[in-house]
Amino acid sequence: MKLGIGGKITLSIGLSVLLISIIAGIFSYVNLTRVFQSQTYTHLESLSALKENSIKELLDELTTELELFNNSSAVRTYLTSFLIDGNINSKEVISTRSQDLLKYKRLFSYVFVMDKTGMVAFSTNIKDEGKIQADQPYFVNSKEKTFIQNFYYDLSLGMSSMVIATPIKGDGGEFLGVLAAGINLDSLNTLMAERSGLGLSGETFLVNSSNLVVTDLLKQPGEAMKETIYLPQIENCLQGKSDDFNLPDYHGDLVLGYYHWLPELNSCLVTKIDDNEAMAPAFNVISTLISILFAGAFVMGLVGFVGAEIIVSPIKRLHDSMVKIKEGNFDVKSDVSSNDEVGDMAESFNEMTEELKKSYSGLEEKVEEKTKSLEEKVDELEKLNKQMVGRELTMIELKKKLREKENGKN
């Protein structure tokens, strides 16, 4: 199929606009994706920082509460009396005060007192009394100041635990023993379960140095203290690193996330959100932009078509005039009168047509003259031919008569 000038112009404009639209769409997709990813990472890092501050505030509150309990006159006197003299009445008062502490804010799950040898002299879990804990970090490191032992597996409880311990000293500052309390991990779970700013799929959770998840998981509820996670981002974090990542999570879903090492807990704080949810606004913007680009391409194509028709129409009319001239109609004149190159060409065409008409008219007159001259010469030749034929016939007749006379004499 022959493609005219108008079709070529329209096709060229359409393809050019489509190509520009595709390039612009790809460029926009890459850049918008990068921008939204960067914004998401920044948002996750901010949320991680807020979680870290909240954890620190919780640990500070736990430390303050235990130290206030230890130093309060209502408890201190009985603690020193119990540890120095083994006074049973003092132990009963300590038990009562300890129960009050457990009920207050419910920050602790159990309370126990160790003497200076590390033996558990009192515990709200009576079965723990008499156990030697002298080699436990929470005893060794709390003889001078308050110490928090991070997540560890407590054999007596059969579960992971965190313990905060503070030294008990006599009036002269001598070391008498250690007051310790198991931290209620529900308070930490509640803190981590707060998902403000994380959408529908976002979450934060903690993984300890043994790869054990110590707080609840959004996609696998009830796995706290049971599930272990071995993923590249977790392994990097447990090496003391902090960074963004775009990798599958423990559930196999692609996520945008930020892992952050918490030395105070010897654990990894993970903040993440599903990639498809995080990037949904970007995809919406990109879809809208692509729609606009293709709508623009359609409009430009339409404009190109109309423009091509405007340009090609006078050329078509000029072409039609040329065809008529080719057929011998020299009276045709182009009606194109545009003030541009096509108009100039039409004017030149009309002038050329006029010259051709004059030339053709002169040629016809010359042909008529030549034809008339030839006809006259043909007539003359025919007359001459007739005369010569007549003479021949006369000569033949004379020769015949002469022979007859000669024959008569003989």
Image (cartoon, grey):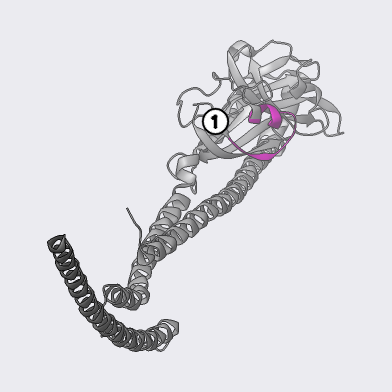
Q: Examine the image and state in which quarter residue 308 appears.
A: bottom left
Percent across and percent down for residue 204 are 55, 37
Q: Residue at x 51, y 34 (%)?
A: 254
Q: Nearer the viewer, residue 197 or 281?
A: 281
Q: Say which amino acid is labelled 1.
A: Pro
Q: Residue at x 52, y 55 (%)?
A: 23
Give the side of residue 220 with respect to residue 159, left or right: left
Q: Which residues are magenta?
A: 233-246
Badge 1: residue crowd in 10 Å (few <14, some 14–19, many ≥20): some
Q: Examine the image and state in which quarter residue 128 appears.
A: top right
Taking 409 as reference, is 126 above or below it?
above
Percent across and percent down for residue 329 are 25, 79
Tell me how many marks there are: 1
Give the side of residue 331 with respect to residue 203, left or right: left
Specify the farthest residue to the front.
Answer: 410
Disc 1 element: strand
Q: Quadrant of the C terminus?
A: bottom left
- Residue 242 is a magenta residue: yes
Q: Nearer the viewer, residue 78 or 265?
A: 265
Give the side of residue 290 with respect to residue 361, left or right: right
Confirm whether residue 202 shows in the render.
no
Taking 244 as reference, is 16 above or below it?
below
Q: Residue at x 64, y 17 (%)?
A: 153
Percent across and percent down for residue 244 are 64, 41
Taking 71 as reference, is 250 above or below it?
above
Taking 252 as reference, is 397 above or below it?
below
Q: Nearer the viewer, residue 309 or 60?
A: 309
Where is mark 1, residue-wise?
248
